[in-house]
Image (cartoon, helix red, strand yellow):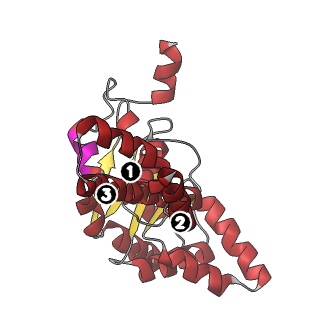
Amino acid sequence: MQNSQIKALAYELSLFGINEALERRFFEAEQEGLSPAEVLLRLFDDEKQYRRNRMTKSLVTKAKFRRESLLENWDTTIDRGITKTKLRELATLNVWTTKKNLILVGQTGCGKTQLAIALGRAACQLALTVLFVSVEQMFQEAHSEKVAGTYAKWSRKMKKFDVMILDDFALRPYTHDEGVLLVELFEDRYQKKIQIITSQVDVEGWKTLFEDPVISDALIDRLKNPSERILLTGGSYREKLGRAT
């Protein structure tokens, strides 16, 4: 009877983690001879984990990832130029606190987007706000917001994300207006927030994508300094998976 009352009170107080774990923890207390303090400690740990998981789920949903991808599921049986040690390093909070951009370079199908999404999910688990968006999609959204007269609000929102993943950068030359948009975005995010860029074109090749060399220099400077470049090698991972099946 008391257990039911405690569960009801926990639910009423929005302690949903405790509500779910209560019966299991009371059973453990009987089996292991736990003290009341030990039971409470486990229950509060359950509540903390429940809230963390719920927050991570919400952040992942808001990030708008294109697909499911986790760092721990990265296939290291095929050499793609990145080690398990490096993957573990990228999953730590230290990487995100340095405000250093990550530039993922490699040919089509090598896993750039997969790795970027996995990194984004790792950031969500560390309670960082993330947005995944292709460059083309971002330009389309910016145009729609300008037509609707809400561009300023949209721009402020874009600048607030802790981590912005820009997928498929440098697929084509950019117009003057597109270049200005990128410079304005990264100017406000410079050394305050983190960019993860995926591109088939290496950084030095970006210079030819913009009509105005001043814009290209300004943009590259803000993305490259400081940054870490990760070159994914080994050709198309999708092709290799296809041959293996």
**Residue at x 44%, y 61% (from the top left corner):** 206
Q: Nearer the viewer, residue 63 or 154?
A: 63
Mark 1 element type? strand
Give the CA distance from mark 3 to mark 1.
45 Å
| Residue range of the region highlighted in magenta in the rendering | 85-89
Dot placed on the residue nearer the N-terminal end, 3 or 1:
3
Q: Position of residue 28 (x, y in %)?
A: 32, 39
Give the CA distance from mark 2 to mark 1.
42 Å
**Residue at x 27%, y 68% (from the top left corner):** 97
Q: Position of residue 20 (x, y in %)?
A: 49, 49
**Residue at x 61%, y 70% (from the top left corner):** 175
Question: Where is mark 1, residue-wise?
Answer: 104
Q: Is residue 115 above or below residue 125?
A: above
Question: Where is mark 3, residue-wise?
Answer: 40
**Three-letter amino acid code of the residue under disc 2:** Ser
Q: Is residue 12 left or right of residue 193?
A: right
**Three-letter amino acid code of the residue under disc 3:** Leu
Quadrant assignment, res 197 = bottom left
- The answer to whether the residue labelled 3 contacts the one labelled 1, judged by CB atoms less than 8 Å apart, is no
For discs 3 and 2, the disc positioned in front in the rendered view = 3
Q: Position of residue 151 (x, y in %)?
A: 67, 83
Quadrant assignment, res 81 = top left
Q: Nearer the viewer, residue 96 or 149?
A: 96
Q: Residues within 10 Å of mark 2 (few under 14, many from 20)?
A: few
**Three-letter amino acid code of the residue under disc 1:** Leu
Q: Is residue 62 left or right of residue 148?
A: left
Give the CA distance from mark 3 to mark 2.
16 Å
Q: Nearer the viewer, residue 163 or 47?
A: 47
Mark 2 element type? loop
Q: Residues within 10 Å of mark 1 (few under 14, many from 20)?
A: many
